Image: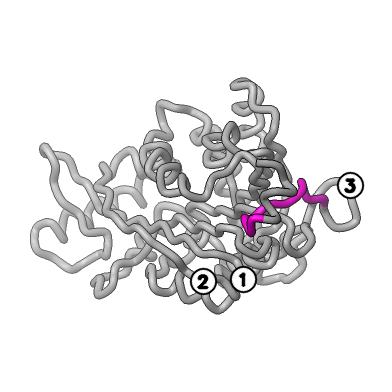
Amino acid sequence: MSPRSAVQSGRKRGKIPGNRGGGVAVSPVERSSVESHGDRIVREFTRQAEGFADPRRNSALTAQLGRLVRFLEPELDPEDVMLEVAAGTALVSRAVAGRVRHATALDLTPAMLAEGKRAADASGVTNLTFTRGDATDLPYLDRSFTLVVTRFSLHQVEAPDAVVREMVRVARPGAAIVVADLVRPDGLGGDPDRIERLRDPSHGTLRTEAAIAAMLTTAGAEVRRAERFDVVRPLEPWLEFTGTPPETAAAVRKEMEAEVAGGAQTGMRPLMVDGALHFTHTHAFVQATAG
C-alpha cells in the first residue's frame, strides 16, 4: 500500500518525523523533581545496561516479547512509522523493524541506547534510529507517528500521565498506541512498590490496568482492547539482575519466605516452585487509537 492510498483509505500513515528544530533529538529535563528521578533512572539503568544486552541474563525481559508482538500484529503495517518511548535497548523496535517502514527508539539512558544500537547493527537492522530524550517531553511535532509503543516504562517514571499525553500528542489520528507494563491487580494486599524499590531504587509505582486505560482516555485516545496475564518468576535471578546488595536481597527473601509461611502480605504473591522461592508479576497490554 502506498502512503497516498493509505491516507485515502483512512489508515494511519505518515512520513518519517523530524525533531523540533532539527539536529540531535535531545530533550533536556528541566524540572528539578523530574531531574531527581530521571537521574536515578539513568544511574540504575546505566548500571544494568550490560545485563539487558546479555541473552543469558535478560531472558525474563525477552520471554513475553513474542506475546507482545502477537498483540501488536493487527496494528503493524509496512508503511508504519513507529516510535518506541522509553525504549531501553529497543527490544520491541528491533523485534518489529522488519515489518514497518521506520522505527525510532527513544530513551533517557545513553548506555541503554548504545547497547540497543550495537544489537541492531549486529543483526543488520537499518531502518531503526536511536534518540536520547525525555518521555515526558518528546522532541517531535504533533501527529508525527503512526504507531507509538512503550513497554515497562509507566511503573518507572515519576509522571506516567505526562508520558501517555505525549504519546497521544505525537500519534497521528487513527494511529495505534500500545502500553505494555507491569500492573497492580485490583484488591492486591501488601505494598509491592516497597519491595520493588528495595531491589531497584528507580522503580516508581505500579498502576492498575484501569488506571492506564483512564490515562489514555484522558489524553484523548480511545481504548480498544487489552490483555492481562500473570508471570511467575524465580526470585534469585531477579535480585541478581539489578545487583541488589546482599543485605537487601536477604531482607526481601526473608519477607517473601515469611509470607509463604502465612505471614504478612508483601504484594509480590510469593510461592515455592520445585523448592525455590518465586513471585508473581501481572502484565497488561493496552491498545488505544489516537483521536
- Against 180, is 165 above or below? below
**Numbered disc in front, either 2 or 3:** 2
Q: How crowded is mark 3: few (under 14 residues within 10 Å), some or many (20 or more)?
A: few
- Mark 2 is on which residue type? Glu
**Residue 165 image point, x, y percent:** 63, 70
- Against 65, is 35 above or below? below
- Mark 3 is on which residue type? Gly
Q: Is residue 183 left or right of residue 101?
A: left
In the image, which disc is placed on residue 291? 1
In the image, which disc is placed on residue 222? 2
Kindly identify which residue carries mark 3. 23
Identify the residue at image location x=49%, y=34%.
51
**Residue 215 image point, x, y percent:** 52, 74
Q: The residue tagged with tag 3: helix, strand or loop?
A: loop
Identify the residue at image location x=70%, y=62%.
170
Q: Distance between the residues labelled 3 and 1?
A: 29 Å
**Residue 34 image point, x, y percent:** 66, 67
Question: What is the quadrant of residue 262 in the picture?
Answer: bottom left
Q: Distance between the residues labelled 1 and 2?
A: 7 Å
- Mark 1 is on which residue type? Gly
